[in-house]
């Protein structure tokens, strides 16, 4: 469900289909819509003081950036199976950890790329220090990762379950 190296992005079939549909919309109907907005704003006259024109151009820029991001992501995507309930931490899993052996100081997060970031749950990339530390660990095992200041931190894996969306 997420990046496991610099060049490969693992996605479930559902995630791949969703991103591909978004790309198709942004590359087709959305481009036509924004071109229409720009043309209508251009007809209003002086472009230097035309807020509608500048807003439409900014929207177009953001849209084209997203098209490039999706194109690159999908070009490097490998479609795989959704994570299993084996209790081994892997991309696409919701992981609950306890810090420094204190089972009262816990946090729960989704181990996935930012494409799957949700307001419902915090998301950590598998390439992040914490993500790298917990990857492949089993429930009950301890994991270490490096903090930004260079020190090591330790966490215990309490739960690892597939993300249900």
Image (spheres, rainbow, N blue to C red):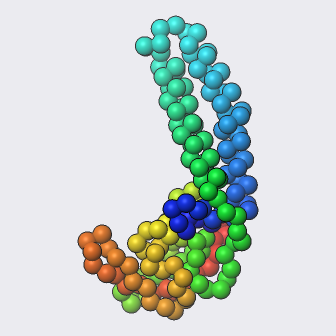
Q: Nearer the viewer, residue 19 or 105?
A: 19
Could one spot residue 118 in this view of the protein? Answer: no
Quadrant where the image shows the C terminus: bottom right
Q: Residue at x 47, y 19 (%)?
A: 51
Q: Position of residue 106 (x, y in %)?
A: 44, 80
Q: Nearer the viewer, residue 127 or 39?
A: 127
Q: Residue at x 52, y 33 (%)?
A: 61
Can you say whether 133 is above or below 28 in the image?
below
**Quadrant housing residue 48:** top left
Q: Is residue 147 left or right of residue 109?
A: left
Q: Position of residue 37 (x, y in %)?
A: 61, 22
Quadrant where the image shows the N terminus: bottom right
Q: Position of residue 56 (x, y in %)?
A: 54, 25
Could one spot residue 64 in this view of the protein? Answer: yes
**Quadrant housing residue 93:** bottom right
Can you say whether 70 is above or below 150 in the image?
above
Q: Residue at x 39, y 90 (%)?
A: 101
Can you say whether 43 is above or below 84 in the image?
above
Q: Is residue 18 left or right of residue 115?
A: right
**Quadrant housing residue 33:** top right
- Most distant residue in the front direction: 7
């Amino acid at each position: 469900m997420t990046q496991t190296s610099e060049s490969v992005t693992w996605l479930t079939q559902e995630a791949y289909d969703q991103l591909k549909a978004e790309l198709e919309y942004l590359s087709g109907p959305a481009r036509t819509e924004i071109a229409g907005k720009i043309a209508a704003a251009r007809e209003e006259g002086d472009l230097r003081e035309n807020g509608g024109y500048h807003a439409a151009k900014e929207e177009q820029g953001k849209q084209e950036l997203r098209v490039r991001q999706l194109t690159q992501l999908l070009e490097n995507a490998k479609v795989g199976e959704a994570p299993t309930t084996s209790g081994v931490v892997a991309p696409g899993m919701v992981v609950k950890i306890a810090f420094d052996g204190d089972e009262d100081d816990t946090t729960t997060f989704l181990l996935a790329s930012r494409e799957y970031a949700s307001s419902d749950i915090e998301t950590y990339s598998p390439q992040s220090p914490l993500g790298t530390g917990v990857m492949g660990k089993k429930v009950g095992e301890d994991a270490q990762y490096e903090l930004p200041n260079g020190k090591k931190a330790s966490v215990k894996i309490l739960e690892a379950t597939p993300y249900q969306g």
